[in-house]
Image (cartoon, grey):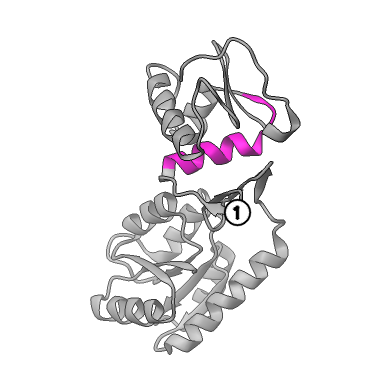
Amino acid sequence: MVSVLIVEDDSAIRSALIRALTAGGHAVTSAATGMAGLTSAVDDHPDVVVLDLGLPDIDGLRVLPMLRAVSAVPVIVATARDDERVIVQALDAGADDYLVKPFGAEQLEARIRAVLRRLATATPDPTATVGALTVNPVTREVTLDGIPVELSRKEFDLLYLLAQRAGEVVTKREILAEVWRQSYGGGDRTVDVHLSWLRRKLGETAAEPRYLHSIRGVGIRLVDPGRGDGDDTGQSGS
């Protein structure tokens, strides 16, 4: 299932696109303003963004570089502006494709498939695999022994960070900076709580860890239990 974010201020067009894409099997979210669209793109990690240019708060041509500064998500501009100069501006600003209104839902779906194919061809597989644990940041899916594991957004971000650096000790300062975007100071309890939830979902405990090993006073290390490299001492109860 492809997740699509529609940033469109016209409620009738927005509703029509949501209905059509949902009927096509996509997971659809939407925003009516540029700033709301930026927030949703960062928080919800859609697979593709469909962006109108004529937004009420900030022009789509200004949204594009702002979005590109924080995300590499493919963007299809869908607008009534058919001036070649504007099309060039949008593509130069980071758009991956350009659709002129009116257009059919089938054409939009074909453009979505095309940009995702190009992305898959150009980008190496970012999936992190540690033992029987796989973490896919594109689909935001986790499996353990082939069985899906349901995680919250922060739990997923935390696990993916640790999986990317499997075998290394990742400090709580680094975790807070990467996952919570905050400096160290009073946030270690937040990390401990999320680690506890994560352990429970992975079928382990702090006393009997398999993948997640706490190194007291240092940080967390994610290991492949099948390799026997997780026998650390000085584990905390987090």
The one nearer the camera, 224 or 179, is 224
Decide which of 9, 26 is in the foreground and name it: 26
Q: Is residue 40 visible?
A: yes
Query: Residue extending furthest right?
Result: 227
Q: Taken as a whole, is the magenta stretch helix, strand or loop?
A: helix
Segment tinted magenta in the rendering: 154-169
165 is within the stretch colored magenta: yes
Vertical order, 230 against 165 (above or below): above
Give the percent coordinates (x, y) of residue 8. Answer: 33, 71
Label 1 SS: loop
Q: Is residue 195 above or below residue 119?
A: above
- Residue 30, position as x, y percentages in the image: 33, 66
Q: Identify the residue at horizontal 40%, vertical 78% (top origin).
A: 21
What amino acid is at disc 1? Gly
Taking the image as shown, residue 217 lies to the left or right of residue 32, namely: right
Is residue 27 found inside the magenta-colored segment of the image? no
Q: Is residue 211 left or right of residue 200?
A: right
- Which residue is the site of mark 1? 146
**Rendered location of residue 216, percent (x, y):** 55, 12
